[in-house]
Amino acid sequence: ADFKTAAPPVVATNEASDVTTTSAKLNGTLTSRGSAASVNVSFEYGTTSGGPYTAVAAGTLTAPGTFSASIGSLTAGTRYYFRTKAVGIGTAYGTEKSFTAGTTPPTVTTIDAGNVTATSATLKGNLALLGTATSVAVSFEYATTPGGPYETVTAGDRETTGDFSADVDGL
């Protein structure tokens, strides 16, 4: 008597792409559909290695090939773990990989100094955007020659946008 054993699919997890502060594209490859005529492919992702995961479907494949799914509502600066999943005759998982959602740097501009005397000045700046930070340390660098060497004076931590300043003396 002849008999055939059922073979599960084989799937690989590829690197994430198009990673932004709030979204990413997860990528995988179905290398074999095993004994199944078609295979349902998906991703599982979360913020803890090994799960718990959130599932996101990526489609049904009838031949080996690449697949992807976009995810959103991510938190900037957070590491996410993900793996591929293939369900045909049996279930297979790809190796877990990870990526970190992007961050946006703060935006700052320099404003002309005020209260300028022979030995002192008030340096001024504007924090236009916090970026993805909740607090930004602002400071000034100043020098007597272009390119430095620079002296640094801190202007504190800011949790909101707006103007800031620092007084320097002994110039």
Image (tube, rainbow, N blue to C red):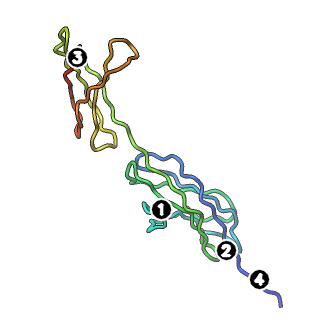
Q: Nearer the viewer, residue 136 or 23?
A: 136
User: Which of marks 3 and 4 precedes in the sequence?
Assistant: 4
Q: CA distance from mark 4 to mark 3?
A: 82 Å
> Which one is in front in this view, the residue at disc 4 or the one at disc 3?
3
**Eyeballing the image, is 65 above or below 142?**
below
Q: Which residue is mark 4?
A: 4
Q: Is residue 19 left or right of residue 60?
A: left
Q: Which residue is mark 3?
A: 113
Q: CA distance from mark 2 to mark 3?
A: 70 Å
Which of the 4 image quadrants contains residue 40?
bottom right
> Which one is in front in this view, the residue at disc 1 or the one at disc 4?
1
Query: Label 2 near label 4: C-beta < 8 Å?
Result: no
- Mark on residue 8? 2
**Eyeballing the image, is 151 above or below 71?**
above
The image position of residue 116, as x and y in percent, is: 19, 12
Q: Nearer the viewer, residue 84 or 88?
A: 84
- Secondary structure of the residue carrying tag 2 is loop
**Eyeballing the image, is 7 above or below 168?**
below
> Which one is in front in this view, the residue at disc 2 or the one at disc 3?
3
Q: Residues within 10 Å of mark 1 (few under 14, many from 20)?
A: many
Q: Residue at x 67, y 74 (%)?
A: 8
Q: Which residue is mark 1?
A: 45
Q: Is residue 111 left or right of residue 72?
A: left
Q: Say what amino acid the circle numbered 3 marks.
A: Ala
Q: Residue furthest front?
A: 170
